[in-house]
């Protein structure tokens, strides 16, 4: 196990804003499970500004109590790193961000959270990016995936909320806390109380300013505000470039919707690789699965089957290695990411798509 009194020099993701460690110490990466058996154990050993890196796999949920300005990040992306509460059901409260120092910020990057209820944010500022919340919530919860109050601000980017359910605010409830939502998806969330639809199918904004941009609300349900419920003294919620479809209602009041439009049910049903994750969610959470940026998963087009035998395998890897370091012009398609040189990212793309092509 790492001796944390001697911090390892480690690169920090450029987009990650961290607070300096005391005494000029360099921020460290604490790995789970290689160095620490759990996220909570790594948190307890961490200093302000450190990063906890969680390996791929299905991890049984624990109650993360986060009281330090740290980053918690998956090492291999949200679809490969699952925090599952299915064994514990709604009794598991997931993570709780509380008691942060003034000005502190917590980042949670790249996880799938399944089950559980009411991840709580009650202090400081938080950023959640490339996170997926699936079937969170249950009876007795308010804000099936996230319940936010007494904090400074919360920013959500490139997150997906699917089939979450609560007594009110199926996915997100925020009480008096500024909420900034960008490029997120809200699919089939619902607010149900006593067997009857309630308020805020996807989110309920109570006395809370909010901006929502470039997001999707599809098939969310509630009596009031099927997609968005705005309540109490909330200022006007500014929504832009956002699509709505098949919600019991889009919002109840006080929404300024700029350049908004409709979305079809294909967002829910398109699953070309039959992995039970909508293609749109895969593309949102892991854009590298569409290297040619044509809006279709590369694995479904089998672009990486370079020798056209309906399987991505060692023969395709050999082609990449054979043209390593060239511009790929001698073998069209071998520069998979189109960056002008055959290299590590092209090899990684082949490995990620390994196996039979989707039919």
Image (cartoon, rainbow, N blue to C red):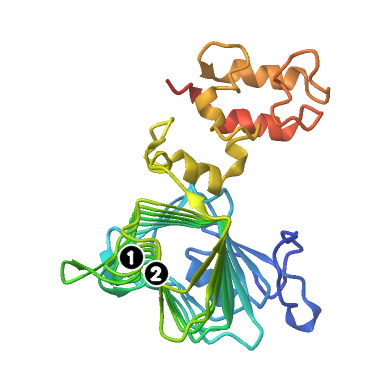
Residue at far left of view? 195
Residue 42, percent from left and from top = 55, 69
Instruction: Give the residue at x 59% y 30%.
Output: 351
Q: Which mark is residue 94?
A: 2
247 or 102, nearer to the observer = 247
Badge 1 is on which residue? 116
Check disc 2: other Cα within 10 Å, few if <14, some if 14-19, many if 20+: many
Residue 211, percent from left and from top = 57, 69
Using the numbered discs, state the Cα–Cα distance from disc 1 to disc 2 in whole angstroms.
Answer: 6 Å
Q: Indicate the quadrant containing the C terminus: top left, top right, bottom left or bottom right.
A: top left
143 or 248, nearer to the observer = 248
Location of residue 348 with respect to 3 vertically, above or below: above
Task: Indicate left or right for 95 with 258 as reference.
Answer: left
Instruction: Give the residue at x 60% y 23%.
Output: 304
- First in sequence: mark 1 or mark 2? 2
Location of residue 322 with respect to 174 vertically, above or below: above
Instruction: Determine whether label 1 and label 2 are within 8 Å by CB.
Output: yes
50 or 119, nearer to the observer = 119
6 or 284, nearer to the observer = 284
């Amino acid at each position: 196990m790492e001796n944390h009194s001697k911090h390892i020099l480690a690169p920090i993701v450029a987009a990650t804003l961290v607070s300096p460690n005391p005494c000029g110490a360099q921020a460290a990466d604490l790995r789970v499970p290689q160095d620490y058996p759990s996220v909570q154990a790594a948190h307890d050993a961490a200093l302000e500004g450190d990063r906890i890196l969680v390996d791929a796999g299905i991890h049984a949920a624990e109650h993360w109590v986060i009281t330090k300005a740290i980053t918690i990040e998956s090492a291999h992306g949200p679809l490969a790193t699952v925090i599952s509460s299915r064994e514990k059901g709604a009794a598991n409260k997931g993570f709780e961000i509380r008691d942060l120092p003034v000005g502190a910020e917590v980042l949670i990057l790249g996880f799938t959270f399944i089950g559980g209820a009411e991840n709580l944010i009650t202090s400081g500022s938080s950023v959640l990016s490339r996170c997926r919340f699936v079937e969170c919530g249950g009876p007795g919860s308010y804000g099936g995936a996230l319940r936010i109050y007494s904090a400074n601000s919360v920013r959500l980017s490139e997150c997906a909320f699917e089939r979450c359910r609560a007594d009110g605010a199926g996915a997100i409830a925020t009480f008096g806390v500024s909420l900034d939502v960008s490029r997120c998806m809200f699919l089939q969330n619902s607010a149900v109380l006593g067997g009857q639809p309630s308020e805020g199918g996807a989110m309920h904004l109570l006395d809370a300013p909010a901006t929502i941009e470039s997001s999707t609300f599809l098939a969310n349900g509630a009596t009031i505000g099927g997609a968005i419920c705005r309540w109490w003294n909330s200022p006007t919620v500014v929504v832009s470039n956002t699509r709505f479809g098949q919600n019991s209602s889009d919002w109840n009041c006080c929404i300024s919707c700029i350049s908004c439009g409709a979305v079809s049910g294909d967002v829910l049903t398109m699953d070309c690789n039959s992995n039970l994750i909508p293609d749109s969610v895969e593309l949102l959470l892991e854009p590298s699965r569409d290297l040619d940026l044509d809006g279709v998963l590369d694995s479904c087009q089998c672009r990486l089957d370079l020798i056209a035998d309906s399987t991505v395998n060692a023969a395709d890897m050999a082609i990449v290695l054979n043209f390593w370091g060239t511009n790929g012009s001698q073998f069209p398609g071998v520069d998979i990411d189109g960056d002008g040189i055959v290299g590590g990212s092209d090899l990684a793309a082949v490995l990620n798509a390994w196996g039979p092509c989707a039919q």
